[in-house]
Amino acid sequence: MDDKLLEKLADEYGTPLYVYDGELIQNRFHRFQSAFSELDAKVCYAYKANSSLAICALLRELGAGADCVSIGEVLTALKVGVNPRDVIYTSNSKTDEELSVALAAGVNITHDNLDELEVMAGIARKKKKQARVSFRVNPDINPRTHPKISTGLKESKFGLHFEKDLAFNAYKKACKMDYIRVAGLHCHIGSQILDAGPFVEAAKKMMAFAFRLKKELGTTLDYIDFGGGLGIPYKKDKKLEPKELAKAIVPEIKKGLRNLGYQPAIVFEPGRYIVGEAGVLLTRVNSVKKTPYKKFVNVDAGFNTLLRPAMYEAYHEVKVVGKKDQQETYDIAGNICESGDILAKNRKLPKIRKGDLIAIMHAGAYGMSMASTYNSRPLPAEVLMRGKKTDLIRERGIQEDLHWKQKIPEDLA
Ligand code: LLP
């Protein structure tokens, strides 16, 4: 994004500000989709990466379905006009009420345990409405990424294990239930994966399992969902293009499909790959402080605005807008009252002064969607650029938001 434009947007809308490049989102969506065109794969964008309405609407416009992890995300998908058949609702823990809403909405429901399946069957029977369900399986694969975002390990809380036939028995049970249509098979092994190997392992296990379901239970699935997880080059040294990923896994999937002898739809749920690189977080320098050990740049954003560095030791490239030569080494310190609130460590950057504008790159995924009002700081604003057009898609939060829905008991007022 052009430095002059970033300055202009920061002046116009204030900071901290998330700015998204809609054309890059479109480019990434098409790149992903075309990489898997041989399979005619359905791309269900993972809303958790960025569930701002305008971003979801843009992706719906491009033809994306929705991977949702809460009823909130399901309702967002329906609000922006995604067909309920293209909505996949996956969560390890759903209330009975949430299951009821999902059934009424007519979305695909992924179960992660048998208690939930029983409840779902009960509700479906009562409402005389068929539920389209799938199970998330635990393929016991190490995706070789950060432990907090590895989900397919055998110790993980997610999925039903192949071991001890836990997954198989769930299908066996579901097949016999009234008002339950066994529609899919789901897995998601982790996030920010830059190595095709674990995806290939997962694909093999999934296709073999689908074969077993057909052979032993006669089950034919409507779809097989391989989840998301494709990483992006936060550091320029390593990346995995969708085309390379496809080259590695499409032959496995095709082989599996030939064995199956029927044609389920193939689904992927990328989140980060679609929106991650397209977002920049703009933050203004409040002050610069030299200590005997370090130089800190205090900015007006913190881990309430971008949690990734504090939560996952994540690296985000940092630029000083409008300045070039790298002369000094700084830590970019957030404004949250915690020592862990460092947005970037030991970065060689141009000489920074109060008032400079800092751009934190690759902040489009899991930035705004994980933002909070911790330390009583209202949420940032968001802007979507498409070519020369810029739209404010979320107004900056205000003080009143922080007190919204709170009550002071009369005797304390
Ligand atoms: N499908 C399911 C079931 C998921 O749990 C996830 C991500 C995705 C798809 C999308 O994965 P992606 O393509 O974006 O890697 N907050 C963390 C990432 C958590 C990912 C959780 N699940 C971060 O900032 O790195």
Image: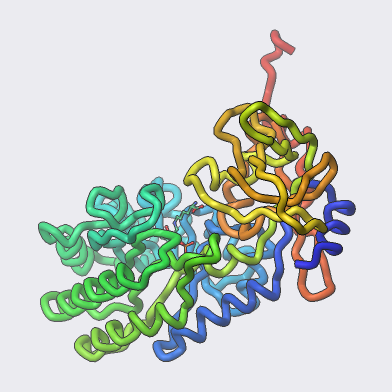
Report the quarter where the C terminus lies.
Answer: top right
Report the quarter where the N terminus lies.
Answer: bottom right
Q: Which residue is at 27% across, 83% downward?
A: 252
In the picture shown, does residue 92 fall above or below 2?
above
Q: Which residue is at 51% across, 50% downward?
A: 314
The image shows residue 332 at horizontal and vertical percentages of 66, 41
The image shows residue 210 at horizontal and vertical percentages of 22, 76
Q: Which residue is at 71% across, 31% downward?
A: 290
- In this rendered view, identify the residue nearer to me: 6 or 221: 6
The image shows residue 350 at horizontal and vertical percentages of 75, 51
Say whether residue 181 is visible: no
The image shows residue 179 at horizontal and vertical percentages of 30, 66
The type of colouring in the image is: rainbow
Left or right of 331 in this view: 283: right
- In this rendered view, identify the residue nearer to me: 385 or 209: 385
In the picture shown, does residue 294 fall above or below 104?
above
- In this rendered view, identify the residue nearer to me: 55 or 312: 312
- In this rendered view, identify the residue nearer to me: 327 or 364: 327
Residue 412, located in which quarter of the rendered image?
top right
